[in-house]
Structure formats: C-alpha cells, structure tokens
Amino acid sequence: MKTKTNLLIFLFFFAGGMAWGFLPMDRLWAATPEPVSQQAPEETKEQINTELGTFARLAHELKPSVVNISVVRQLPSRKGFPSQLPGAMAPEANGQGSGVIITSDGDVLTNNHVVDGAKTITVKLSDGRELDADIVGTDPKTDLALLKVRNASGLPQARLGDSDALAVGDWVMAIGNPFGLEATVTVGVLSGKGRVIGTGPYDDFLQTDASINPGNSGGPLFNTKGEVVGINTAIVPGGQGIGFSIPINLAEEVSAQLQKDGRVIRGFIGVGIQGLTPALKSALSLKPDTAGALVSSVVQSGPGEAAGLKVTDVIVAVNNNRISSDRDLLREVARLPIGDEVPFTILRGGHEKTLFIRIVERPDDTLAYRVWPEDAEQGARVGVAVTDVLDPENMPVVVVTEVVQGTPAHRAGLKRGDLIRAVGANSIASSHEFVREVARTEGDLALLIERQGATSFVVVKD
C-alpha cells in the first residue's frame, strides 16, 4: 500500500510539472540527483519534490559569482559653470551595472559601457563586501571590459561554457542587478542566435526572453549546467522579452587578449566588403546560390592589393573554411594571427581561385569628407546628374551632383556627393564613361559608390 502511495505522489508531481510546462530534471540541473530509494528519509523526498520544476538550487549556487559594479565618472566641465571656479569640484555622475567573476583572484567580465570613463570602480560581492577594482582593458567594438579586483583571492568564480553548443529553445538564466535590485534572477529560453542589432561590425548576439533591464548590463547568462554562456548587454527599448547577450566564446577570446595586451588586436586584409543581396547577384551575373563577401574596395598598397584582390571579387573561403556572408569574413579575419600568410578562396569570372594574403593589424577606422562642385552632365536612365572632378590625389573621378526625386537612383539611395567608381565590374573615370557603361548595360545596374571614404555597391533597378 505504501508503494502505491509513493507512486501516486510521484505521478502527481510529474503530471503537475508537465501541466505547467516544466521540463525533466536532466534539462534543469547540472547533475541529476541519484534516484531516491523507497527507504529514503521523508524529508529528503519532500525536498526533491519541492525542487522539482524550479531553478532554486541553480540560482543559489550561481549568485556568489555575480557582482554589482558601481562607478563614478567625472563629467566634462562647461565654460561658465561653477566647476570652472578656483577650488571647485569637477561634476561627477554615478553608474551601476553587473559583472561575473571568472577567476578566483579577481578577474571580472562586464560591459565596456558599464565602466567607460570611470574614475573609480567598486565591486560588491554577494556576501556584502565592497572591493576596489581596476580596468585591465576594454574593447568598445564588442562592448566588453575586463576588470581586476584589488588584493583578491579565493573568490567564487563562475564556470565558462560553450555558446556554440546552445540551441534555440534551451533554458537560460540571467542574474544581475537591474535598477539596483541585487542578485535578481530571471529565467527564459534562448530565442535566437547570430543576431545583428547594429551596434558594430562584430555583432553576433544571443537573443533571450529572460528578462534583462538597465543594471543587468555586464551580468552573466547561464545555461542549465550552471555555465556562463553569455554576457548580457542590450535590450530593445519599449520591447518585452527581447534581450541580447555577447556569446561567451567571443568574450573569452576578447578577455584573453585584454589580459595579455590590454587591448584587442584584430586582423586586416585591406579591403572593403559588403553582403551579397539577390539584386546584387543578378546585377553582377552571379549564381543565385553564391555565398560569401563581395569586395567593394581595395586599399592602395594594402595586403589585399598586394595579393591581387580586385573589386567585384567574391571571397568565399578563408583558410579553407567556407563563409556565408560579409560578417562571417569580418569575424574570421579578425581572429587571424598578425603576420600569417593565409589562403583566401575567391570567385572571379565564374571560377574559383586561391590568393595568399598576409594578415596585418587592423587600423582605426577613419573617414574622409569631400565637397564637390555644382555643374553636371545628365546621367542616362538612372536619374542622376554627374560631373568630372579631380580627387585629392589629382585622379579623375565621377561625382553625383543631383538626384532626381522618384527615379531609380533616388529609390536606390544615391546621394549628392557620392563618387561613382564603377558600373558593374567596369571601372570609370569620367562622366562620358559612366553614360556609356549605363547605356550598354542591360537590366539592373550595380554601381560602385564611394561615400565619406567608404565604398559599396548600390543596385539601381531598371
């Protein structure tokens, strides 16, 4: 009779768990408890039944590795304000965020925007201790920062997992300090991977519906094994259940470089690239299933030019690893060791070939601005007025001086001041050549445009 009662109790809790959408224990805990024998103490069975379908044990184990980060920033003074008076204190502002301890001697991962411009940084542990911390290094391009807690040892560190192993629909847990509410736990699922949200060239975010709010920034996203799989970073203003985390695999790469050099050194091959849209593939006579990154510019005297890369080449593989997009190429090149000569597979004229490119350190991005004259010659069929000018190197170029409203050029996004460098695969250096190439090109036009120092192809629909 006792056995039947126990069985009924087990079935009751199991059915109740499934009715409320709970998953089996092996999806919730890092290690599934050993089956309880019929002779187990009643309090042990009651504890297991209580924990069935909750994240309580996981949250209890992980909270100590999550910290509250408080910063004081010195604000820039403005002329005429009291801070300009002798002896006046410079204005300051306070900020808060979250972080996760990744080594027992005090390495803490967080967001760059949490500590950017910080004059002082204080890390508060789960046991109430408040310790000073210093910035080891930051990487604004991925919004990551590595801190070092002063005079620390024996701190509760988190285990790092594998973000590549995550699958959409997996359970995840966020812990942080939203609005100053310490050690707040929220639970949800992984909603998406590889999200691009426009924060920079290396966007590759995890999306989750686990609630993330201001103050969660820099805090960890855990999997059900209790491993860090992401660093919580961004939300959609006004959205609900849409939060974004930096994959921990990327964060590990960045933090290792910050630990070694205090900054991130990325590879560079000296080309401008863009994604291949269906319209571009059609305009450049590429097959619909072509995947890769389109070369839209080649830096003079750069590694790409030295290796023979040309505008309209499509890079389809790096180090024999196929790539599917321009962002894939950016990430792959960024990881390559400086000084290595690496094989790049390109598609040119319908055939693949391999070029060996020596990797150099990526320089800081700079943009050049130009102003152009008013006189123009009308561009046939496109809806633009163009003229011939000399660039700063005294080389002839074609510049757009007017875009007619409602024309194909206007719909394609062409603007006054754009330089037209090529029509399709054919370079041009005069308005006469531009008109000639447009007139003899059938179908959509792929125009290579330079704007504010950057070049890209624009498709003008026929």
Image (cartoon, rainbow, N blue to C red):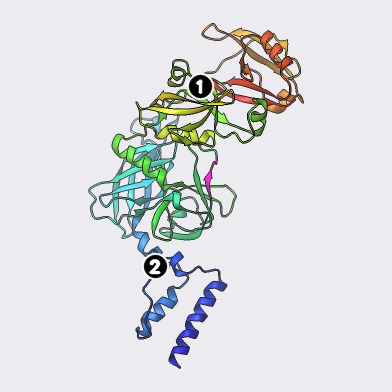
Residue 150 appears left or right of 223: left
Q: Are the residues tagged 1 and 2 within 8 Å (C-beta)?
A: no
386 relative position to 14: left or right: right
Q: Is residue 56 magenta?
A: no
Q: Amino acid at mark 1?
A: Leu
Q: Is residue 163 visible?
A: yes
Identify the residue at the far top of this view: 394
**What x and y, as percent, mark residue 403?**
71, 20
Answer above or below: position of 44 versus 444. Answer: below
x, y percent for residue 9: 48, 84
Write down the region rendered in magenta. Answer: 192-197
Label 2 sits on a secondary structure element that is helix
Q: Is residue 76 visible?
A: no
Residue that badge 1 annotates = 367
Q: Amino acid at mark 2?
A: Arg
1 or 2: tag closer to the N-terminus: 2
Quadrant in the picture for residue 86:
top left
Q: Residues within 10 Å of mark 2 (few under 14, many from 20)?
A: few
Question: Looking at the rendered structure, which numbered label has been put on residue 41?
Answer: none
- In what element is the residue under mark 1? loop
Category of crowding for the residue at label 1, using alpha-carbon neighbours closer than 10 angstroms: few (below 14), some (14–19), many (at least 20): few
